[in-house]
Image (cartoon, helix red, strand yellow):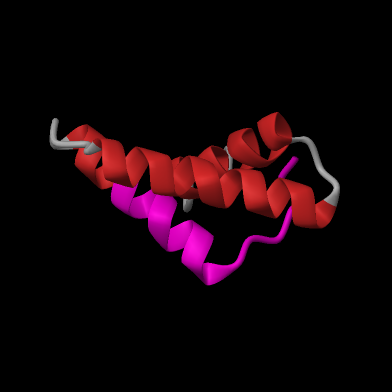
Amino acid sequence: MSDIEFPDTLIALERTAWEEHRAGRLTVATANAVQDAITAHAEATGVSRYTVEMALKKAVRHAGTAEG
């Protein structure tokens, strides 16, 4: 899963969503923007949307840790 390359814009969207989530202020607009971008990336790369989403979350949420 970690071999997927993400555009900087998708990483930035997920970081924003994760920061909003952690602060208890995730908006529907942010969540929808991330999901739309994940779907578009999955379609463009031919990778399942689920796989893209899980790899993106791992890349953002576990960046700099031993696991990701």
Quadrant into which the C terminus falls: top right
Left or right, residue 26 beside residue 15: left
Q: Quadrant of residue 20?
A: top left
| 7 in relation to 66, above or below | below
Residue 3 shows in the view: no
Q: Nearer the viewer, residue 13 or 62?
A: 13
Farthest bottom residue?
A: 8
In the image, the segment drawn in magenta is 1-18
Indicate whether residue 7 is drawn in magenta. yes
Q: Nearer the viewer, residue 1 or 32?
A: 32
User: Residue at point 78% right, 35% down?
Assistant: 48
Measured as percent of width and height from the top left, residue 3 is found at: 77, 52
Measured as percent of width and height from the top left, residue 23 is found at: 14, 37
Left or right, residue 31 beside residue 68: left
User: Residue at point 75% right, 40% down?
Assistant: 1
Measured as percent of width and height from the top left, residue 17 is found at: 32, 44
